[in-house]
Image (tube, rainbow, N blue to C red):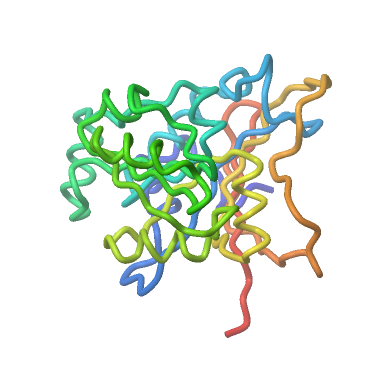
Amino acid sequence: MLWPPPVAEITDTELERLYDYPPDLDRPWVQVNFVASLDGAVSVSGRSGGLGNPGDKKVFALGRDLADVVLVGAGTALVEGYQGIKAGEVRRERRARLGLAELPPIAVVTANCSIEPTSPLVVNTSVPPIVITTSAAPVERRRALAEAGADVVVAGEDAVDMTRALKALDDRGLRRVDCEGGPTLFGALIAADLVDTLCITYAPLLAAGDSGRIATGPLLDAPRDVELASILRYESALLVRYRRTRTE
């Protein structure tokens, strides 16, 4: 069975309720979004777009609508051609109704500060991006990005410390965190036990090939426990949400 019980067509209001963040957050809440084939591939021909469907794309856009900030790894941002988020009519209305800023910034995680000052992320945006990097990244790269308008954050020495990165977002009032990948960033968040929700679309495809899994990173002492939050179906695809189970 599907849960919540299926209806003829789920409304935008109900979809928003399912995917929204908890109210009155007192810390960053990380909601991770991925799409994967049934055999575990995270991309087709190097990009995740080949796995998507209209239902998945709608939820992907909704994730941006509901967030204070979109968090993404530099590799994913470059491969997928990221630029600043645009304000359509639906997005503008929804964010105004929820009391959110007109648009969320994109926060890019890059240990070596690999984003160029001429990147569309920097020059084709209404909201300055946040570049989260390390003290080991070349000073001239950090300076060039700051001069181009990016908010450059140093969070770690040789590798980005995701706890410090989220603290920097929290300091900026950005607690509703929509993480769009990639696998290395997701793995780092899992290792630091910072994932609160995973939204994953299982595309009805068998892709084979050499595509990697949705998370890569250090071995854990023990897997993280999660619980099922919802399952939706769009044609033959399943859109599943899991929440981290924690004992406070």
* Label tally: 0
In front: 214, or 232? 214
In percent of width and height, residue 223 lies at 78, 64
Q: Quadrant of residue 33?
A: top right
Which residue is outermost to the bottom? Answer: 248
Q: In this view, does 241 lie to the left or right of 65?
A: right
| Residue 203, picture quadrant | top right
Q: Which residue is drawn at 19% across and 37% down?
A: 92
Left or right relative to 197: residue 183: right
Snapshot quadrant of residue 219? bottom right
Q: In screen coordinates, is 18 left or right of 12?
A: right
The residue under the point 27% across, 23% down is 124
Q: Where is residue 79 in the image (x, y as percent from the top left)?
A: 55, 22
Choose between 162 and 86: the one closer to the eye.
162
> On screen, 61 above or below 171?
above
Nearer-the-camera pick, 87 or 83 = 83
Q: Which of 151 and 235 is in front in this view?
A: 151
Looking at the image, which residue is at 44% across and 61% down? 166
The residue under the point 69% across, 48% down is 1
Q: Considering the image in quadrants, where does the C terminus appear?
A: bottom right
Q: Position of residue 206 (x, y in %)?
A: 79, 22
**Residue 202 in the image: above or below residue 120:** below
Q: Where is residue 202 in the image (x, y as percent from the top left)?
A: 67, 35
User: On the picture, is 151 further left or further right than 185?
Assistant: left
Image: 91 above or below 219? above
